[in-house]
Amino acid sequence: MKLHTTDVLIIGGGLAGLRTAIATRRRGLETAILSLVPAKRSHSAAAQGGMQASLGNAMKGQGDNEDVHFEDTVRGSDWGCDQRVARMFAHMAPKAARELAAWGVPWSRVRRGVHEAVMGGQPVLLTERDAAHGLIHARDFGGTKKWRTCYTSDGAGHAMLYTVSDRAVAEAIPVLERQEAIALIHDGFRCHGAVVRDLVTGELSAHLARATVIATGGYGRLYGVSTNALINQGMGAALALETGVARLGNMEAVQFHPTAIVPAGILVTEGCRGDGGVLRDADGHRFMPDYEPEKKDLASRDVVSRRMAEHMNRGKGAASPYGDHLWLDITMLGRAHIEKNLREVRDICHYFLGLDPTRDWIPVRPTQHYSMGGVHTDFRGESTTLSGLFACGEAACWDLHGFNRLGGNSLAETMVAGMLVGEYVADYCQSDLGELDLSPSLAREFVAREQAALAALAAGRGAEDATLIRRRMEEIMTRQVGLFRNGPDLEAAVTELQTLLERAQRLGMRHHGLDANPELVAAYRLPRMLKVALAITLGALVRTESRGAHFRDDHPARNDRDWLNRTLAWWPEGGCAPSLEHDPLDVMQMELPPAFRGYGVKNLIEHPEAAARQAQVDEMHAAKLDRHAAQSYLMSFKHFLPERYRGRNERLDEPLPGVAPASLPALSDDRQGAGKDAGATS
Amino acid sequence: MSRSLRFHVFRHNPRDAASAPSMQTYTLEETPGMTLFIALTRIREEHDPGLNFDFVCRAGVCGSCAMVINGRPGLACRTLTTALPDDVTLLPLPGFELIGDLSVHTGKWMHGLAQRLQTWVHTAGETDLDRIEAAMDPDLADAIYELDRCIECGCCIAACGTAQTRPDFMGAAGMNKVARFRLDPRDVRDDADWYEVVGDDSGVFGCMTLLGCQDVCPKQLSLQTQLAWLRRAMARQGVRG
């Protein structure tokens, strides 16, 4: 058996995993990353619109700060998030955007003077101030009070991933490509690393580590149509689930994005609407203002997606061979804007739909997009039940997004979580708890178990077909665990998924090889996917309320009285279904007490303590303290942050106390001389 | 009336001594909106679950699925079968280590390139993350992003005469990266530094100006322009010494 040891083992080479690795490496820890694909091919690359950070540079971002970002995030989550984590996040996001700027991300910059723009389909004039010229720009996104989403055209994920991935190369962090963790090595209390399969040779090895970090992204591919990359099959969640010890959080919280193209399911960014585009129905009518007069097309994603489905159910969808859809109209943004800031959208329309979005409307439909649920951790990113196991990014539920994530908060989360969790992982490794506990016999036992399971699977001569079972699972998840859910459908789904899980043990294989054999990969991932699907479905069945993206036709009210809590799921050893428990959120600790989110009609069963907490909060605000002081009294959080990240964020409108305002040295024209050929920009 | 498409696919497992490179033909009925991603997935699911190929994003952004499609390197995921004749020949990208069938190690090659060219911004000193970021000219930021759009798919290397004859040639992908960091005012490297890295036949002087790279780049990067400017700057630097 090949045995590797390292201080930190990171599973997943996307933005969250890479940034975590950079943090632990910089703390002097030996760090290795496992990745299914070359790091730059990770799904982070597909993020288009941008990352939220309250820099407040652009005119429409003026007055923005951590408080506003925090409130938007909590409201967006439908009060399902951990407010302490949301606070830490809002505080860190500007630092993350600035770090990326220093590392080389070519953020779009503010240009001084008057500009034509489009808001809600209508032309407007915006004037940018001189002082902001050349600072990081921001665009509008759904569910936010300010323009806060930093961007590079519509390739923000690509630009960030390439910068951070190359930064990891600079720090000599090994990324082991085409390596898949197939089991965590643990003793029931502590995680010691993972059993890893080489996807090219099929060879198994053991990687032992002080700390293991799951950063594998979401579980969108459990659904038949998803914007997610093909590798987002929930294997990180499955790794945790199969320990029988680690918990998954809020797995039923699954986001559907309003604008994926029909039929391919490829995302076109929320930036289309942020930049002024609108949704239209079969008659060409702009329908969102009828439902949501205030936020219109830029309501929270869960709201827009449901409104679209409702509108189609009323017969207003445009018919197509692939079922009904609606239209996204960005024609009024003009060719120049689309070719500069929405060029991926233009390419996607051109290559996959054969249309030109500067002239034609884009066929769109709500489609599975994001996993709010994931490996449950505390605010440090560590599992609450399995020491030494950490998780971050979309794979984790720490829990920033609650039941609905805001656009632009995902890219921001990958960086912030990497910066923070990386430090906490390093703290853990450098503490007594994190001593490397080398147990080759435990490793051997786990490798032998996996080897035997794979050999049995590869030899399989059963009657079942993995492709058919997977397709059925995708159909169940789409139809019965989708945008609208109800008790009987969910119950039937649980029963059938359990049957599929049983059937998945009796697969017939055409290729019996143990090396680069895609049939074998599909076969061993299938039961893992089904287990994760069961955790989602059971969570959705038990949660008899509607919150954020989890909507129950039979329980349409948000019920804070009974369900202001987090669903925790784990898979008991030898069981045939996950077990669930519910971890309450403490209203009396909240900085923003639960309230009506402001979409549609108010349908809310209030928490008995909400009014009392609101009174305390109102009293604090009435005292008219400085905003930092008020915040600190209500829900102090800075002491949880690593010391290096506790400083306030400077803004044009908010100079740092006792520090001269930034003089803004321009990184521009004068450097373009000798070495920088101006012609090379053409 | 739908067409019957014949896919002639390269098959080989380089780790199996018994495997000899061969072509295998699969026949599929064309469906509306069919891409090579859909076709190859169907071949794997319905005909041959052991067929190796790479797709990740299937949306034309991750660069995983480049292959030679009827003689021309391109991204399979966004190639519609309607643009192809009834016979479609699929080969792995040449110039990269073969994993099996249509799957090659472009990632490993590109990682080597990142190490060799040190494709990260070289700065002096730490940045204070609490302070307002340094300003950058908006046009310059846009110009850097323009060059930053390479997805490392490997098409330009597969289409390059020099890269196919000398394995140490960094290709248009490499040159474009040099151009990107050379343009970036955050990077302290100057032309004397760049000359050390690309000022020979494995770099900018190895280019034979065939410009297949420009023809096949799926992101339409201005590779021809970048090569020309870089060669001029390096020649100047070489003369200057």
Image (tube, grey):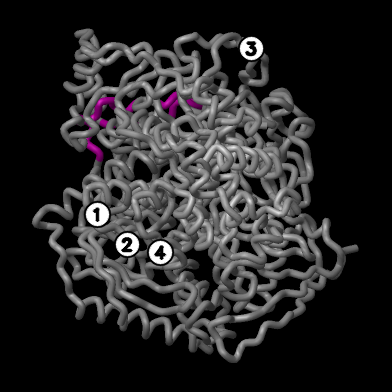
Q: CA distance from mark 4 to mark 3?
A: 50 Å
- Work out how far the residue at label 2 is from the one at label 4, CA to CA, in angstroms: 21 Å
Q: Nearer the viewer, mark 2 or mark 3?
A: 3
Q: Residue at x 69, y 39 (%)?
A: B225
Circle 2 is placed at which residue position?
Answer: A240
B229 within the magenta span: no
Is the C-beta separation of discs 1 and 2 under 8 Å?
A: yes
Q: Earlier in the sequence, mark 2 or mark 3?
A: 3
**Residue A534 to residue A314: above or below:** below
Residue type indicated by callout 1: Ser
- Distance from label 2 to label 3 (Cα)? 50 Å
Q: Which residue is mark 3?
A: A124
* Nearer to the camera, A218 or A44: A44
Residue A587 lies in magenta, yes or no? yes
Image-based side of A384 in relation to A547, left or right: left
Residue A311, image x, y percentages? 65, 35
Marker disc for residue A176: 4
Mark 3 falls within which chain?
Answer: A
